[in-house]
Image: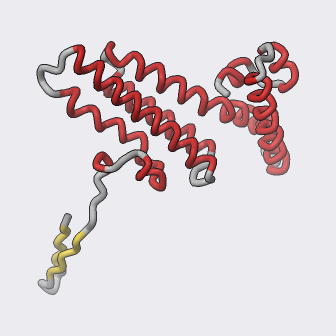
Amino acid sequence: MSVKIKFPNNKTIVYKVPTFKVLQHSVSELEGMALLLPFYILKVRNELEKKGTDSEKKKALSKKLEGYIIEIGKTLKRCNENNYITERDTAMLLRRLLNIYKELYGKHGEFMEADMTLKQIVDEGMGEIWAIDKAIAKAGNDPVAKTKAIADTRAKCIIAKAMKAGGEAMDKIMRYTGLSRREIMAL
């Protein structure tokens, strides 16, 4: 892309601006550009909007979209684990992904599996965020109390995940950790 700038003294300068076309890259290539990840699902839109796209073609596109969603979810998780983005950023990007998905593909019945996969990824990414937000709200404006609340909640989430993986009853996990059913289900 070129940008031509004319100055008052009639001098003209042409700047060449490199462009980065998101959809021409793989999800893994976008790992350092996490903000762009939710837009990757646009890759299926052009094929979907072609005239004559029958139900079988839509189902095939749904499978392709589901693969992209899983890859985006794993990449966002890696970005968070590597401290490229915070938990809050991850939650925000997952919400953006869900919003874009609903707008573009939500009305197509053939996309049910991709829809369920996305909702599962969003829920799993949100459990700890919900618990931390609740703890921060209880801590008030004291920065020390907030820091302690975040650390305590993260520890509770680790314990809850281990108990859940070990097959413990939901009521027992709730009693031991103080987390809500919704928070535990989303872990």
> Residue drawn at (22%, 74%), measured in percent from left and top?
15
x%, y% of residue 50? Answer: 15, 27
Q: Is residue 115 above or below residue 151?
A: above
> Residue drawn at (26%, 68%), measured in percent from left and top?
17
Residue 113 quadrant: top left
x%, y% of residue 87? Answer: 63, 43
Quadrant housing the N terminus: bottom left
14 or 157, which is in the foreground? Answer: 157
x%, y% of residue 39? Answer: 37, 41
User: In the figure, is residue 112 to the left or right of 120?
Assistant: left
> Residue drawn at (80%, 50%), measured in percent from left and top?
143
Question: Residue lying farthest front?
Answer: 166
149 or 110, which is in the foreground? Answer: 110
User: In the figure, is residue 159 to the left or right of 40?
Assistant: right
Q: Is residue 83 above or below residue 182?
A: below
Question: Residue lying farthest right?
Answer: 176
Residue 172 quadrant: top right
x%, y% of residue 156? Answer: 81, 33
User: In the figure, is residue 88 to the left or right of 170?
Assistant: left
> Residue drawn at (78%, 22%), measured in percent from left and top?
166
